[in-house]
Amino acid sequence: MTGDLPGFADVVIVGAGPAGLAAAAELKARGVGSVLVLEREAQAGGIPRHCGHSPFGMREFHRLLRGPAYAARLLARAQAAGALVKTGVTVTALHPGSGLSVASAGGLRQITARRVLLCTGVRESTRAARLIGGTKPGGVLSTGALQGMVHLQALRPFRNPVVLGTELVSFSALLTCRHLGIRPAAMIEPGPRVTARRPAGLLPRLQGVPLLRNTSITAIEGRDRVTGVSLQTADGARRRLACDGVIVTGGFRPEAALVRDSHLTMDPATGGPVVDQFGRCSDPAYFAAGNLLRPVETAGWSWNEGRIIGRAIAESLGDEVPDFAQNMKIELQGDVLKYILPQTLSACPAPAALRHFQLRVTRPARGRLILRVNGEVVLSRALSALPERRITLPLNALPAGAEGVAELSFEDGPA
């Protein structure tokens, strides 16, 4: 799939994960002439192709699938619809007006498009980003690296690692370990509770893996290979745990280097681009969907988001979505609310693609969400939420035709 690249497409999609492939199929289904999907990896499909376990696909295909089969079906659907998918192609720069610089085995070139959709996804935070000290031995892996070694290369990088984190991807790491008979020495969570929703927290118990809450890894030990980790609990107690590897899971950040180095406006809260209710960036030729918008949502959520943003792009090409004209900026007040998207709203009579605000909290929160427009309270809603749990608020909570600044805040108290 790495053959000659066209110099023009009606829509270029950067990233061939669930969001990008869903958007490609939707765009072709809506009659868009040429849709080109560019993927830097050797294979399309995104993160799911590394996940040799279920459940994937219930929303999309109405059946349970393992990750590789799910990714293959998404690719086949996009190609059957008529999208051109090119792998081994790296987009190196985004230019105003939807021009792209790309690099592939065939060399460097420029591609232009009427619209560009960015679906570059997320990456896990590294050991360095988490400020874990100690030595630098082999055997410290992210979930993605582990899954690639186990499912794509049938390699067993260790026998008794520890798993750092309890996000959904952390339990994917546990399932990946089981695939080749790897038995984790422990699952370690710095906070007081499991981050992922129930019943994920039952998996360590079912696999006989100790779950250590309120515990942090302060240092990794070993010379050539990991030999153990130093642990510290919330009350200051310290101990050593023998292990031969560390799986550093979660702590996702949008894969936004392209956006950061471009002319597009970034949102420091999400780590991705600022978008309006159509997924449209500050340059209206560019759109974004999937986990580039925030860290992190499920494959099914990203797939659906790609589909609805793809529909918005098709409508923009048909002049059904008017030119970008921001008339409302959304701001967060205080330190409890972590992020919100979309961050702006455009004056437009067309139905929104993103019909809900998406937000999360930085700590366990119980109280009320207060929405003010130009200083006037327009919504007060009870909220009881935990960090890394999806919270949605209908866009129509804002009065029709409202302009200016909308401020969203949280007040502790009875929900």
Image (spheres, helix red, strand yellow):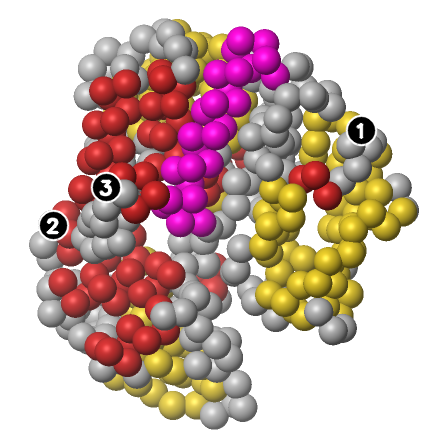
Residue that label 2 marks = 153
As drawn, is 346 to the left or to the right of 65? Answer: right
Query: Which one is in front, 110 or 327?
Result: 327
Asked whether the viewer can see residue 158, the reply is: yes
Residue type pointed to by label 3:
Tyr
At a point 52% along the width and 60% down the height, the residue shown is 389
Residue 298 relative to residue 65: left or right: right
Start and end of the magenta stretch? Answer: 297-321
Magenta region, main secondary structure: helix
Q: SS at mark 1?
A: loop
Query: Is residue 308 rendered magenta in the image?
Result: yes
Task: State how far apart marks 3 and 2 are (Cα).
Answer: 19 Å
> Which mark lies nearer to you, 3 or 1?
1
Mark 1, other Cα within 10 Å: few <14 / some 14–19 / many ≥20: few
Residue 70 numbered mark, or none = 3
Q: Residue at x 43, y 32 (%)?
A: 306
Q: Determine the image quadrant of residue 178.
A: bottom left
- Marks 2 and 1, how far apart in space? 55 Å
Quadrant location of the N terminus? top left
- The residue under label 2 is which amino acid type? Gln
Disc 3 + disc 2, Cβ < 8 Å? no
Nearest-to-viewer mark from 2 and 1 = 1
Image mark count? 3
Where, by quadrant of the figure, is residue 22 drawn?
top left
- Give how far across and how far down residue 176 sits, in percent: 21, 61
Q: Tag 3, which secondary structure? A: helix
Which residue is outermost to the right?
375
Q: Earlier in the sequence, mark 3 or mark 1?
A: 3
Numbered mark located on residue 401 in the image: 1
